[in-house]
Image (cartoon, rainbow, N blue to C red):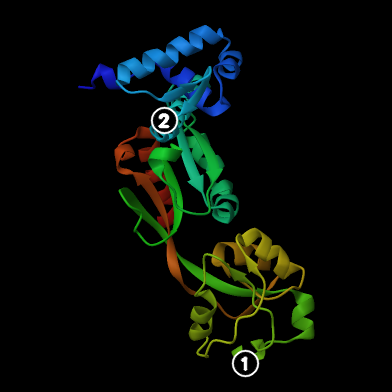
Amino acid sequence: MRQRRFLPSLSLLAAFESVLRTGSTSAAARELDLTQGTVSRLVQNLESQLGRPLFERHRQKLIPTEAAHAYGRDVSRALDLIQRASMELVANPGGGTLSLAILPAFGTRWLAPRLGAFLIKHPGITINLATRLKRFNFAAEGFDAAIHFGTDDWRDAGHMKLFEERLTACISRELFAQHPIRSADDMAGLPLLQLETRPSAWPIWFAAQGSEAATVTGMLFDQFATMTQAAISGLGVALLPEYLASAEIAEGRLLPVLEQSVPGAGSYWLVWPQARQNFPPLETFRSWLKNEISG
């Protein structure tokens, strides 16, 4: 059972969080559409319930304690989660909302084209998407699941492997005409575009070509989309996942270099917090993803 002393009402928490964030009871009163006196009483009631002061009083000013700052961070996250859950409930009264964090390139080029079929098959489920480049704290962010690249090492999370990443080196037609490539040795001197999250990608690719890795010099990117556009513009050779490379090659924007689709250094995973293991929309989405991968 939850102890009521440690479950302050939303009105108390909202007043405290607003004063902490805005810096004064008057500003909080305007934000909450309350009187300044009401806000002050709500903060005092919260302090009484918790049994310790959250602010020091100096000449009608409230100075938050260090403990108040730490407590406020958690309270702010909790209020955000409650607001988000309420918005999702209003948007989808059936409770079929899945909040999914995605990698930008994977989400736009692999997942998005397939989502239409999922939504037609499961009209009661709404999927909310947001991009995240790096792993995060599920409890703090409020996502039900995420698409992750790497290994099955996300802490306190369930994992389902989607597929291993395979890499193809791609070059623009113009750059290839200036610098033909018939062997890995011909790569010497060419700018090799790099991605922050794939530091070992080029050595792995050269090893798959049966060659020693060339000195990697070239622009550094944090997303595949910008790196792909740089390659199309002739700024260097890009090493792209198969699902990206195949589309650019098929549409004639890039040419493949030497052996295509060589194994990379990681895999794509669906990951979720253990507490959401049996969440119905997640179970449905997980089952659909499994069929998409095996099909």
Looking at the rendered image, the quarter that the C terminus falls into is: bottom left
115 displayed left or right of 171? left
Q: Position of residue 65 (x, y in %)?
A: 42, 31
Q: Quadrant of the N terminus?
A: top left
Residue at horizontal 56%, vertical 7%? 35
Q: Is residue 290 found left or right of 231 in the rendered image?
A: left
Asked if 171 appears above or below 126 in the picture, the reply is below
Q: Residues within 10 Å of mark 2 (few under 14, many from 20)?
A: some
Q: Secondary structure at mark 2?
A: helix
Q: Nearer the viewer, residue 235 or 56?
A: 56
Q: Secondary structure at mark 1?
A: helix
Amino acid bearing label 1: Asp
Q: Which residue is mark 2?
A: 68
Task: Establish if 295 lies above or below 60.
Answer: below
Label 2 is placed on what type of residue? Ala
Q: Position of residue 237 (x, y in %)?
A: 67, 76
The residue singled out by tag 1 in the image is: 185
Indicate the position of residue 59 as horizontal and vertical percent values: 53, 19
Task: Please rate how many residues cluster around mark 1, counting C-alpha atoms within 10 Å: few if below 14, some from 14 to 19, many from 20.
Answer: few
N-terminal of the pair, mark 2 or mark 1, is 2
* Residue 93 visible in this rendered orientation of the protein: no
**87 and 65: which is toward the camera:** 65
Q: Are marks 2 and 1 in contact (CB under 8 Å)?
A: no
Q: Is residue 263 above or below residue 107?
A: below
Q: Is residue 228 visible?
A: yes
Using the image, determine if residue 286 lies above or below residue 142.
Answer: below
